[in-house]
Amino acid sequence: MDVIAKRQALAGHIRVPGSKSHTIRALILATFAEGRSIIHNPLPSADCLSTAAAVPLIGAEIDLDLNTEGLCGSTWIVEGAGKHMHLPDDVVNVGNSGSLLYFMAPVAATLDGWSVFTGDESIRKRPVDHVVDVIRQMGGEAFVTQPGSKCCPLVVRGPVSKSGKIITEGSVSSQYITGLMLAAIRMTGPMEIELTNPKETPYLTMTQKWLETVGAKVTVSPDFHHITVVPPAECKGFERTIPSDWEAVAFPLIAALLTDSEVVIENIDGSGTQGDDAIVAILQSIGADITWNREEETLTVRGGKKAGDGIGRLSTEKLPQKELHVAMSGFPDAICALAVIACFTEGRVVLEDAAVCRRKETDRISVLAKELQTLGAHVEEGEDFLIINGHSPVLADGSSNPAFSLHGGICESYGDHRIAMAMACLGLGLPVDEQIIVHNAECCAVSFPHFFEEMDRIGSQFKKR
C-alpha cells in the first residue's frame, strides 16, 4: 500500500495505542505465571500478535476477546503455563518482532530440548550472534543454521537451570538483556549480568519493574553495568493496565508541530518507565509549544500559526553553540521522528550515540540520511550519528524562509514502521504544492494499528492507493 501525504492543518483529540514494549513483557510473564493474568489496554499490533501466537506454543492459553469482526478486544486474558511450561510445539516464527526473538531465545534455553526461531525477511537479516554467545554462557547450546551467517534461523537447546555470571556488550541491544532477565526468573538461583557498555537503559528499567511485579528481586547498579536477578519462589498471575506507547506518541506530536495545528494527545503515560518521554523536553528546548497535563494525562500540541506566538518557529538559536545535541542510546526508536522535525528546525541538530539505530528493522541512520536527502534535506551521516542542518519554513518575523529547501518525492519505507510513519508526517509540513508518496506504508501496523485512520480523524487526509 502506498500513502500520499500533503500539507494539512490538524485539529482535535487523538489517543495512541498501548505500549508494545509493555505488552510483550506482560504476555511473556503471564505465560510464566501460575494462574490467570488480566491485561488491559494491550497493543493489538503485529509484533504483539506474534507474541500472542508464540506463547501458546510453550503452554499458555490466551483469550484476545475477539469481536465479530475479528478485531482484538481491550482486555486480554492469559492462563499461565507456570510449572507446566514446555518446549515449543512448533518453530517459533516471530514475524517482524525483534523484541519477541531476543526475549524468547534465552527463555528457550531453560526448556528441555531444541527450539527453533525464525521470522520475516527483516528478522532474518538481524544479527543473533550476541544471543548465541550469552546462551552458551548460560550453559545452553545455540547456533544459527546458515553457514557463515549471524542471523536466523536460530536453534537453542536447554535446559539450563542455574547460571552464574553473564558478561556481554550492552551497546548491541537491550532486548536480549531483557531476555536474560526474563530467563533468570526460571533459574534455581540468582543470575548476575555484567554489561560492558550499557545502552537503551530505560528499557532495562522497564523490565526490572515488570519482574518486580511478579515477585523477583532485581538489583541494578546506577550505571547499569551490573544487574542481579533473584527468581521468585513462585510467579503468580496479575492484573495490569498497559500504559500508552510513547514511541507512538512521537508521530502525532511532530505532525502537529509541522503544521498549523492544535492537537490533544490523550492517555499519556507519566510513569517514567518509557525513555521516549524525553522527546517532550527536547522539542520544548527548540521552541515547541507543548503542554503536558500530567493530571489529565494529555499533551496539548500547537504548531505553526496555532502556536502561542502565532508563528510556531522551531530553532536551536537559544541552545549552547546554537546546536541541539541528543544522545539517542536511551530511546533510539525516537530517531525517526526527531530526524524529521530537525529538517523543519532552524539550526544544527546532532542525533548522536546512535549506533544501535543501525540494528533495528532497518539501518535507520543510513535509511534516514538517504530518504531525507532525496527530499532536499542537508544531512550528514556518521557511524553512530546523524546531523541535520535544517531550516524553518518561516523566519523569526513569520515571513517565508527562502532557505527552506524541503520538497516532495517518493519515499521507501523499507518495511520499517517508524520510517513509514515519520515520512508520512513529514509530508504534512511541506509547501502546499508538494506531496510525498510512501511505499509499503502498511508496515505501520507493526506498532500502531490503524495509524493512518487515526491521523485522518484529526485532519491528515492521507490518501491510500
Image: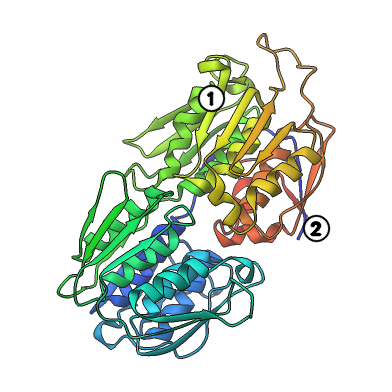
Q: Is residue 137 placed above or below 9 in the rendered structure?
A: below
Indicate the quadrant containing the C terminus: top left, top right, bottom left or bottom right.
bottom right
Lower sequence index among marks 1 and 2: 1
Residue 396 quadrant: top right
- Label 2 secondary element: loop
Of the pair 393 and 457, the residue shown nearer to us? 393
Please name the amino acid that badge 2 sits on: Arg
Residue density around tag 2, few if under 14, some if 14–19, many if 20 or more, within 10 Å: few
Residue, disc 2: 465
Indicate the quadrant containing the N terminus: top left, top right, bottom left or bottom right.
bottom right
Of the pair 164 and 69, the residue shown nearer to us? 164
Q: Residue at x 69, y 39 (%)?
A: 426
Q: Position of residue 146 (x, y in %)?
A: 63, 80
Q: Is residue 278 placed above or below 318 in the rendered structure?
A: below
Q: Position of residue 368 (x, y in %)?
A: 69, 45
Residue, disc 1: 288
Q: Position of residue 390 (x, y in %)?
A: 69, 26
User: From this viewpoint, which residue is outermost toward the left?
Assistant: 233
397 sits to left or right of 176: right
184 sits to left or right of 385: left
Which of the numbered marks, if any, corresponds to residue 250?
A: none
10 sits to left or right of 66: right
Numbered disc in front, either 1 or 2: 1
Please name the amino acid that badge 1 sits on: Ala
Q: Residue at x 25, y 48 (%)?
A: 221
Of the pair 72 and 23, the residue shown nearer to us? 23
Residue 341 quadrant: top right
Q: Is residue 223 placed above or below 442 in the rendered structure?
A: above
